[in-house]
Image (spheres, rainbow, N blue to C red):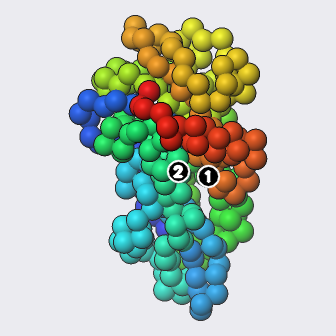
Amino acid sequence: MAYYFPFGAELHPLIQEDKSPKKVFVLGVYASAVHATWKKDNKIICRALAVASEPRIFWDGNEDEAREIISKIAIPAELGRLEPAGSQLNGPSAKVLDENILAPLGYTRADAWLCDCLPEARINPSQAKALREKYEPLIEAYGLNPVTVPPRPSAFCSKARSEEITAELLQSEADVLVLLGDIPISQYLKKAADVPYSTLGEYVSKYGYGKVTEAIVGGKTLKILPLAHPRQIGALGAHSEKWFLAHKEWEQAQKNKNKI
């Protein structure tokens, strides 16, 4: 079934493109979207409207790419125009991944196989509010498409999806599994391996933040490294100061260490 963003771009899944063997497998929560600022008569209608799937998983928000993607989205002239929403709204998690997670471990993006529990974007509550207030009242008058991208769920990883992730993990040949936040731990790892924790907090209370343990996943023994979600690590909007500071301490400790 096809799903559509406001102004008609079709939703598509984001998966790892480079399938050569990797050193580290990174599991996030769900895919993000390209965000546009919607303006009319030089007034902002909506500062950050999700209008398309990102061009690739953990996209860095490149403005030229954003502009090209947005330029292909048809918006009635009477409703104004769309333009890239900026680096704080497009690709911030990718920068955190590269600079605050992979680099301290001694890896580059080329060393990593990237995956999300849910490989497609979803509409979060703030986006749903913007759509209700700004977009939906215009649908009938301007012949706009209804937005059918599903809302952000509470369950991101079904049994079938868990099996798909395990297959990807084994295909990657990575020896290290990095999990970003509670959801990859509780909804994937807890199902796929026999581990005595379900959240990052439980893990940290047992082993410490940024400490590596081992687990058997799909018959393979892996080094397991749960870390905070990029939102927490990069202080991207509402975040936990506890996890922000814990990660900063871990980054500092990593500076004089070798790769795990």
Viewer-proximal residue among 185 and 165: 185
Cβ–Cβ below 8 Å for labels 1 and 2?
Answer: yes
Q: What residue is shown with label 1?
A: 234
Position in image of residue 244 (x %, y %): 69, 46
Viewer-proximal residue among 260 and 125: 260
> Toward which corner of the image does residue 59 lie, by quadrant?
bottom left
Q: Which mark is residue 216?
A: none
Residue at point 32%, 27% (across, down): 172
Viewer-proximal residue among 249 and 80: 249
Viewer-proximal residue among 122 and 185: 185
Residue at point 36%, 67% (across, down): 65
Residue 212 falls left or right of residue 112: right
Looking at the rendered image, the quarter that the N terminus falls into is top left
Position in image of residue 31 (x %, y %): 50, 46
> Toward which corner of the image does residue 226 lie, by quadrant?
top right
- Residue lying at the far front of the rendered structure: 256
Count neighbours of disc 2 (C-alpha within 10 A) and say few if under 14, some if 14 to 19, many if 20 or more.
Answer: many
Q: What residue is shown with label 2?
A: 96
Q: Is residue 41 visible?
A: yes
Amino acid tagged 1: Gly
Count neighbours of disc 1 (C-alpha within 10 A) and say few if under 14, some if 14 to 19, many if 20 or more.
Answer: many
Looking at the rendered image, the quarter that the C terminus falls into is top left
